[in-house]
Image: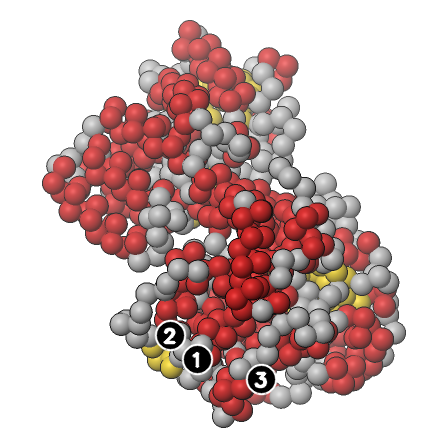
Amino acid sequence: MTAVIDLLNEQRLELGPPPQRDRWRHWTLARDGDDVAWLVFDREGASVNAIDEAVLDELDAVLAELDHDRPAAVVIRSGKVSGFCVGADVSLFQGVDDPGQVAQRLSGAHEVLDRLEKLTVPTLAIIHGPCLGGGLELALACRHRIAVAGATFGFPEVLLGLHPGLGGTFRATQLIDPIEAMTLMLTGKTLDARRARAIGLVDAVTEERHVAAAVRNRDSLRPPAATWKHKVFASEKARGLAARKMVSQTAGRVSRDHYPAPFELIDLWRDHGGDRAAMQQGEIVSFARLVTSATGQNLLRVFTLREKLKGQGDKPAAARTTAGRRSATAIRHVHVVGAGTMGGDIAAWCALNDCRVTLADQQPEALAKAVARAAELADRKRLGGAARRALLDRLIPDLEGTGAGHADLVIEAVPEKIAVKASVYQELGRHMKAGALLATNTSSIPLEILVTATNMPGHFLGLHFFNPVAQMQLVEVVTHEDLPDRQIQQVLAFVRGIQRLPVVVRSAPGFLVNRVLTPYLLEAMLLLDEGLAAETIDQAARDFGMPVGPVELADQVGLDVCIAVADMLADRLEGSLPAVPDWIRRKVEAGDTGRKAGKGLYSWKDGKADKNAKAPPPGGGLEDRLILPLVNTCVTCLREKVVEDEDLLDGAVIFGTGFAPFRGGPLRYARQRGIDEVVVALRHLAGEHGPRFKPDAGWWQLEQP
């Protein structure tokens, strides 16, 4: 019997005979004393509800029974504590390349939700937790939606290179303001229950203890009436005008060539928004075309890569037991040493995610600035007054550093100087409690050097966050030969618990992300040295699909930081990298370090690079000069076992560098382009520009798909 049915029984609802789970694998049906049918979605063998063909086939059978023996009303809700439904099971579409096959399967799925919509009795979706994608489309097929406080709603399909495919395009635009509905689908943003109620996506918001009463009072629910906007946008001309604005706004964020889904959604609404049947058919055909495209398949792969990175924290040392209690090894108290940009922002992020954090620094001004940035983070996250105060209460300035004696995890974020770090470790070693972990946020110093300065090699590791901490999802968990697996699993659970994606990397020069990013940035500097315009170089990278060009990225990271990492790698890798041009070194010596200084390779105004709009467009071959050194170094890292496998490498590079997601990762890109072709291109570049382009020996070790 599900948790939800148990809850209903606690509320003294008479549900008649206990529901029989053996009738269906994913649904449970029971009727209460008022002849209301409670249909509970509880996908077998899963911690969350996701929709697949088996779920829909069973729902169709349940609806047939309800249509034959009609109750007074039908209530659909989840039996999972985790939430209502996170959407469709994306594995259904991976590896599928036949749009006709997908369209046929989707048509059958639409028939099931149409059947739900056409039930002649009131239907209500009771929603707690996430209600996303296909889950929201299921709820939209009901006559009413009641949100339990804390529920969230959204159409994240656009983030997978898709748009809603189970009726969301026409049901959402019919139910609420069409512009609100399109914005929700075009951005993939999530709404809380209050906002969903305000725009009419749900009819009411209540507390869990009042759900039964809300169902009994269902006759008082009134879905939103058609607004003047519905009438206006029934006109094809009006939709055309609105669609042009949507296209312009969307084109400012993404390229139609790289991410066609939002543009196809706009076209679909513009052409068929006044005709439900045509829009339904258009949705099916468009979704099928998108999901079987190279972009769609690559973005589905990115989703699975994210899940694989997250899954690294799903080990026995995870932060909570199956009973929901924190495990004995959970990291509750974090102590951060160093309140500079990285240390302060790491501390704020941990506090945001419910950790007790002590932040140590000898400079009160640094602590004050870190707390101020934490307050800004709370504002950006739109935390209410109580939540904002709670975050700041959890972040404790610690001039004396006494928090180190109570912390489960100490994170060192002091300057990148071995002597400074060694001194910090010696002091910490006198105060840390037994069993606590010590992590360094170093971006370049090998752990085998730093570990000699500690007296706890079995509890020392690297935790490499990226700047800006609140935006960059990846965290490198850097290991060494003396670190036991139990400690690795403990840290993986911690990283996942603070809503970040961990990747385990072996201690090696530059670890993974900086190792593969440095050749890309250096090549841009060499192109500048050859006389190419910064704007031309950056445009070539953006044409490939990178979110920001390498010249602008170097300025954002800081030219001083880039040069320090490049020099370290050049020393450790015995000259396999080109030297930084002298004129760039002189810029840094003069204080022109990039965005933080207001001047670097670009001049910066109000946080934005001042670019010349008349710079020449990139010529042929420029993309390869920038991208192939990065891809070649990825193969090197895989060969050297810096990371465990190809999937983790692709995922880490996407989430750690912004590598064009629609290409599915650097090694996926190489495979789709053709390994032989990439090797030939590298050899050609090596002949023209030198041995830095020599294909790595690992190319011949890659397994063929």
Mark 2 touches mark 1? (CB < 8 Å): no
Which labelled disc corresponds to residue 366?
A: 3
Q: What number is the disc on residue 80?
A: none
Q: What element carries label 1?
A: loop
**Residue 654 appearing in the image:** no
Three-letter code, disc 1: Leu
Label 2 CA crowd tier, 10 Å (few <14, some 14–19, many 20+): some
Q: What residue type is labelled 2?
A: Ala
Q: Which of marks 3 and 2 is in front?
A: 2
- Gap in angstroms between the C-alphas marked 3 and 2: 38 Å
- The answer to which of 134 and 565 lies nearer the viewer is 565
Q: Which comes sooner in the sequence, label 3 or label 2?
A: 3
Residue 601: give its label.
1
As measured in the structure, the alpha-carbon distance from the residue carrying label 2 to the one carrying label 1 is 10 Å
Image-quadrant location for residue 218: top left
Give above or below for 31 relative to 439. Answer: above
Q: Mark 2 points at which residue?
A: 533
State left or right for residue 78 relative to residue 615: right
Q: Residues within 10 Å of mark 3 (few under 14, many from 20)?
A: some
Q: In which quarter of the image is residue 694?
A: bottom right
Mark 2 and mark 1 lie on one chain; the one further toward the N terminus is 2
Say which amino acid is labelled 3: Ala
- Figure check: 26 above or below 687: above
Residue name at image x 56 percent, y 53 percent: 680
Picture coordinates of residue 151, whole percent (x, y): 47, 43
In this view, the residue in front, 254 or 549, is 549
- Image vertical order of residue 95 relative to residue 184, above or below: above
